[in-house]
Image (cartoon, grey):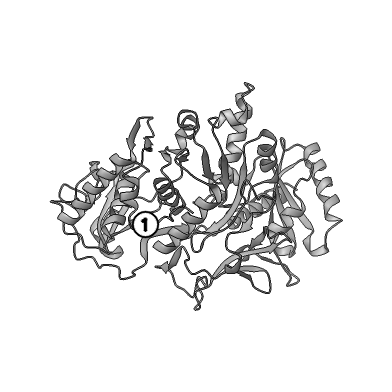
Amino acid sequence: MSEEMRLQGLLDHYAGNDAVVVDISVGGTRREVSHAELADRVRERVEDLRSAGVRPGQLIGINARNSLEWLVWDLATLEFGAHLYAVPDGTPVPGDVEAFLAEAGLVALVAEEAGTEGTGTEGTAGGPLLSPGDRLTGRRLHLDAPAQDLPNLHSLVFSSGTSGSLKGLRISRSGTEYVINRFLEAFGVTGEDRHLIFLPLSNYQQRLSVYCCLWAGADLALAPFQRVFAALQSERPTFLIAPPVFYDSTLQLHRKAGKGQPLDAFLGGRIRFMITGMAPIRTSTLDAYAAAGPSLLEAYGMTESGMIAWNTAGARRAGTVGRLIDPSAVTFTEDGELVITREAPLSLGYFEVDPAAEPTFLPDGSILTGDFGTLDGDGFLTLRGRRKDVITLGSGRKVNPAEIEALFAGTEGVAELVVVSSGHSGRLGAVVSLTGPVTADGEAAARAAIEKVNTTVDQHRRLGSLVFVDHPLHSEPRFQTKNMKLRRAAVEEYFAELSARRESKV
């Protein structure tokens, strides 16, 4: 059995690799360094932290786009014993940097705007606002910032749930190692692989992938989303991890290309496997990839606990999120909610969040996932919806919208159906995306197909009021969280708005 990955000693391990790291900018500039060259830059940054007077346990903030420098900051703080405070992608740099650093307890903040004049930030030369490539020595740092006293702490990150609200999480070293070692074992990543990352490194899943590739000696490519399809051709990755919207967009672009090019070639021609998670994926999307050849596998996890289940090439079942990684760590509440009790959860808990408002971490160390699910006879997990998404009907009965949406999956003429509460009626409604334009005939045909399904389900699960649109809501930014999950509250508001318009025309 191969040696298990450990964060302590990671630097010395990848310093001996022959693999490379590629960094592609928004403008298309390509840089490439070997793992050994990356290690040299990390060692320089470690010495910079030491010379500047930073202490182990202190926090360095970063608010920047993906880049080679982002990796150097992350890996250097890891090696030195400090901690990276990863600001969510797209967050504006605060106008009063000094106040932000004091409030968050940071020594300094790394941000691209640091070198830009006229930003209104307090990042003049010598201050604690640094560009990604700046040195720390000679800067006016907050060296009195408190050191974190959690021995198992790795990093502070933010995650958004289905509500779209950000929650700060303390990431553990042991949980990081647990997830990566299970991934290496399940998917067999080696020095022959190349991984492409295009989601923000502030999303902790991407950093798990970085450490995984560094340990395995696999090539790693960073590309902005605007360049991802060009990067697929130039970098030819062997595996990808992305939300459903990426795989939907890939299918659409491949079909529009219309050159008879196989989907595998469109993806670079070397794909071994692709993983989808972060949100439910449509059955039609999975079917399209299965028919075309590339292996698209559903997986399930959360930043609080780490990965929970995944399909693999050797054990997969369509419509499920795979087999449990650690069956002994999973139990179910009476109403079917998954509970994770793991010795090494990915997160040590929330920060800047009222525990009473987020009853996720239980006193005994267990984690409430908020997800309802069931196991089949072969141990494959099927998710049945979110606790926060439960709709209470006028009768007092509670229903999971995802379960009802599954009943209507594949309905003729329907591309997507999102179940909502219809408000004053106390019944269920739905926003229905048609496979074609919204016409009287198309709407009538879809309504008839939905009604046919309605007659086969329990009364309280039937859909009443329907509104029709010609575009899937999952692909619209206003209906997505930062993790690209569906914001059901926003869909419900949209449903009410469209219903009101329809009533005003009657």
* Residue 266 left/right relative to 176: right
* Residue 147 left/right relative to 489: left
Query: What is the residue that sits farthest to the top in this orientation?
Result: 259
Query: What is the residue that sits farthest to the front in this orientation?
Result: 1
Q: Position of residue 466 (x, y in %)?
A: 74, 51
Q: Position of residue 305 (x, y in %)?
A: 51, 63
Query: What is the residue that sits farthest to the bottom in this orientation?
Result: 363
Residue found at x 36% / y 55%: 86
Q: Nearer the viewer, residue 448 or 156?
A: 156
Residue found at x 23% / y 65%: 145
Query: What is the residue that sits farthest to the left in this orientation?
Result: 138
* Residue 194 left/right relative to 74: right
Labels in figure, total:
1
Q: Nearer the viewer, residue 358 or 306?
A: 306
Residue 366 visible in rendering: yes
Question: Is 67 situated above or below 428?
Answer: above
Q: Position of residue 239 (x, y in %)?
A: 52, 40
Q: Quadrant of residue 31?
A: top left
Residue found at x 57% / y 42%: 274
Q: Which residue does the numbered mark 1 point to in the structure image?
A: 7
Q: Position of residue 313 (x, y in %)?
A: 62, 45
Q: Quadrant of residue 168?
A: bottom left
Residue found at x 58% / y 47%: 276
Label 1: few (<14), some (14–19) or many (≥20) C-alpha neighbours in 10 Å: some
* Residue 282 left/right relative to 351: right
Q: Amino acid at mark 1?
A: Leu
Residue 93 visible in rendering: no
Q: SS of the residue at dot 1?
A: loop
